[in-house]
Image (cartoon, helix red, strand yellow):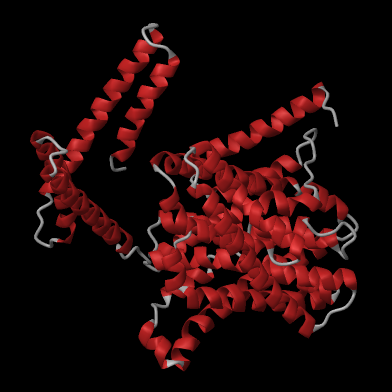
Amino acid sequence: MQFGAEQDLQLLGLLAALGGLLVLAPTLRLPLPILLVFGGVVLGFVPGLPHVVLAPDIVLVAVLPPLLYSGAFFTSLRDLRTNRRPIAFLAFGLVAATMATVAVVTHAWVGLPWAAAFTLGAIVSPTDALAATEIASRLGAPRRIVSIIEGESLMNDGTALVLYRTAVGAAVGGSFSLLDASARMVVDVAGGIAVGLAIGWVVRQVRRRLDDPPIEVAIAVLSGYFAYLPAMAMGVSGVLAAVTIGVYMGWHTPELTNERTRLTGDAFWEILVFLVNALVFGLVGLQLHDIVDALSGTPTSTLAGYSLAVAGTVILTRIVVLPVVTYVPRWAFRSIREHDPYPPWQYPAVISWAGVRGAVSLVAALALPSDFPQRDLIVFLTFDVIVATLVLQGLTLPALIRVLHVSDDGGAEREEAKARIKTAEAALARLEELLEQGVVHPQTAERLRGSLGFRRDRFLARFDDGDDGAIEERSVAFQRVMRDLLAAEHAALVALRNNGVIDDNVMQRVQRDLDLEAARLDQ
């Protein structure tokens, strides 16, 4: 398809509008997904702008693997293990409960066939951690709450999409067997994990022999596809394969890479995930125009009733199930209660209100075959659930956290302080060894000993109840001076470039070193 001048200007207007939404996000202090959905809805109804349609056959393959891989890669394996019981209850039990309740409501109220109703239930059952964890982390919610929300979102994607494939197969094939579906699910789960581990081992062996940041980062980006596509070709869960390789490589990558690769990779992933999520959430809104047109024969009041019924079912199911899976196992089993005591009631209250839906639900709905029964209505209802949870829960979650006085317990800061103390002590011990070997000049060793000792003492003071804060004040003052000095160096460097004394390549090399020094300072 070739674009003419008019189409080029329309596309330019669309991109400029989406770029404007990104610029507005920090000013309006709204979670980015909410702003993008609202903006997309408005843009979708602007006359003259092109209608954006995602091809169902490629949407899952193009969008999901990098999102799943990155989410799994940056997830704490220790937190997953520590919270495996609540995460498992939510990722399996809550997903199944949501799918079942949505199926019953949509079959009875909306009139969807059972297979299509279960398909919709599977589509809207997984949560999206982007908006919820952004809010919870920003407001200083306890790390366990954030970890459970992230872990649930990571694991329930796989569960929901396995159920989704089963329901779609039943709807298209016209038959369903509980025994066959259960066996299929076991094969999907086991096969997806096996493929992810196998491909992860291969990627790990390849990356062990590389020392080139761009190539290593490129392989990391492709790793989700390396696991997802073979798994899908084998008929097992590509989602779990992508998640598994993400967790596997997240654990082993620190041993395979140097500082240049890690810095490059972290920056690249942050930008890539941001842009993909921005694109997906923006497209949620842009799809609405065509979805509404396809349902023009259904009265608006009827569609509104359907939307309220489905969104209400999704939200209420989570509110009802969360206290059950939180307290009943502890009440029933003493071993669980002793290992993990009853949490404050505020914790399940916050988690139950953090069930925001997003990108995974959207791409699953859009990936339905074009001849799927009631496809347009399913896509419309999915869109409404995403918007309802983003707006109702996403906008009110900060107030709920503040009202319930749920605050960070400081566990992450204490662990970070311990890590910095131990690393400084390891460096001091190694410095003494090098000094004994004659590798380090005594004056150099004394200067390094002072710097490392100050760092160690600074974080040790955080565990001293009698600390008067003097060492922290010295650190803040030092960093303030360093920022002023680095700013002066940067201004001098730019002046040298502007006056023709040095070229741009020299400036960029020196500027990179200054940026690295600035990045080492505390935020």
Is 280 above or below relative to 347? above
- Residue 317 appears left or right of 10: left
* Direction top: furthest residue: 500
Task: Identify which residue is drawn at 86% across, 74% down.
Answer: 113
Figure quadrant of the N terminus: top right
Horizontal side of 483 relative to 284 (left or right) equals left
As drawn, 165 above or below 58: below
From the viewer's perspective, is 416 left or right of 279? left
- Give the camera-side residue of 505 and 226: 226
Comparing 179 with 485, the one in front is 179
Give percent across and percent down for residue 476: 20, 41
Please tell me in which quadrant of the rendered image residue 378 appears: bottom right
The answer to which image quadrant residue 368 occupies is: bottom right
- Position of 46 relative to 396 (above/below): above
Viewer-proximal residue among 329 and 456: 456
Residue 339 visible within the image: yes
Image location of residue 488, percent across then percent down: 27, 21
Q: Position of residue 162 (x, y in %)?
A: 70, 69
- The answer to whether residue 472 shows anywhere in this view is no
Q: Position of residue 267 (x, y in %)?
A: 47, 41
118 lies above or below 367:
below
